[in-house]
Amino acid sequence: MTTPDASQPAQFRAAIEAMHRATVHPSIEVGPIRPPQRLAPYSYALGAEVRHPDSEGVPEQTEGDAFGRLILLHDPEGDEAWNGTMRLVAYIQADVDASLAGDPLLPDVAWSWLVDAFEARSEPLTALGGTVTSTSSVRFGDIAGPPRAHQLELRSSWTALTDELSVHVEAFCEVLAYAAGLPPAGITRLGARGSAGTADA
């Protein structure tokens, strides 16, 4: 684990440490990736994807069948739109079969995965919002991949009301597991690894 930067706010450092205490599905690989810049004074990001036997770590960019990103934004002064100081932004994409992609209830079901994941943990949060999209693509010409592909995409954001962000990582990975169609299984601890984030001066 990279030594946390003492110049960063204690709340931000504590939140990142909590993220690495999360326990997730053993088939999901989670690790730090480069966070976006200029969205907040401080930011940190985790990448997650369904682990395959030949995979090594969590890449910055992936074309896997199910992956996601969870970004922590922190503004010590608070943000009126966030109604707090810690905003989490999540993105999940997963390949789905044609029959599921064509189900008009798929977006509602996928959103309920996220809501239920937080409700099951009784985790306080506010300003939860997002979109769920089911897409289909057809490949033509000299391009790799199946002729037709279908994906589920979930974009969401919310404001954490406590620093215990391990619960948020666990809820996020639970949704990824549902989207990937992973069977129920035991959980794996992330461990205290990764850097303490970056400050955008």
Image (spheres, rainbow, N blue to C red):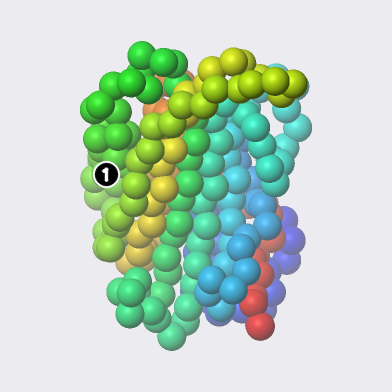
Q: Residue at x 44, y 16 (%)?
A: 97
Q: Residue at x 44, y 59 (%)?
A: 88
Answer left or right for 105 relative to 168: left
Identify the image quadrant of the N terminus.
bottom right
Residue occupying image coordinates x 45% and y 56% = 89
Please state which amino acid type lies under the numbered disc 1: Val
Closest to the observer, 23 or 199: 199
Residue bearing the label numbered 1:
115
Q: Position of residue 147 (x, y in %)?
A: 59, 15
Badge 1 marks a residue whose secondary structure is helix
Locate residue 152 relative to residue 192 in the image: left or right.
Answer: left
Quadrant into which the C terminus falls: bottom right
Residue 56 image position (x, y, % from top left): 75, 32
Q: Is residue 13 left or right of residue 130?
A: right
| Residue 55 seen anywhere in this rendered image of the structure | yes
How many C-alpha atoms fall within 10 Å of the one at disc 1: few (<14), some, or many (≥20)? Answer: some
> Is residue 187 in sight in this rendering?
no
Residue at the (42%, 69%) spot, across then down: 86
Direction bottom: furthest residue: 77
Vertically, is 73 above or below 91?
below
